[in-house]
Amino acid sequence: MSLPGEAVSSDHPAWPVQEQLKAYNARDIDAFMRWWADDCLYYAFPDQLLAKGADAIRARHVTRFLEPDLHGRLLSRTSLGNLVIDHEIVTRNFPEGKGEVEVICLYEVADGKIAKAWFKLGEPRLHPTI
């Protein structure tokens, strides 16, 4: 298991996962997409296909990257072979207001890119309004 912020080498399967999270937090769609394979598959856990291919993944994130408070906070990362599992708290701007959601992200990495990804989301929690 690696600790949040722990560096990994560019040949480690966690490298593309780490770099796409940095780009996600910067809301930089081009840098984000650099780490996804052209034919990647993007699932809601366990098997609901949400996006097939890089163009569909880009389309899902263009609008999300407009959210001013979007941020994924890495709690832990574990890797085994070419699988990388992140546990994150993601801050979002939901239609009902700013909040956060706990997410388990499972990435399958091949040839230095994310080939498949599965996401299991907890219940969104809205931040209290003042």
Image: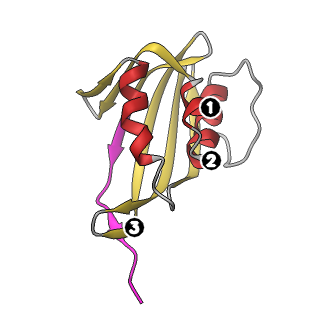
Callouts 3 and 1 close, C-beta under 8 Å: no
Of discs 3 and 2, which sits in the foreground?
A: 2
x%, y% of residue 111? 60, 9
Which label's residue is closer to the chain start, 2 or 1?
2
Residue density around tag 3, few if under 14, some if 14–19, many if 20 or more, within 10 Å: some
| Residue 38 against residue 60 in the figure, above or below | above
Q: Which residue is mark 1?
A: 31
Q: Tag 2's secondary structure?
A: helix
Q: Is residue 125 magenta?
A: yes
Amino acid at pointer 1:
Ala
Q: Is residue 1 left or right of residue 98?
A: right
x%, y% of residue 48? 22, 29
| Cα distance in 3D space between marks 3 and 1 | 25 Å
Residue depicted at x 45% and y 56%: 67
Q: Is residue 6 left or right of residue 59?
A: right
- Give the position of the N terminus as an image quadrant: top right
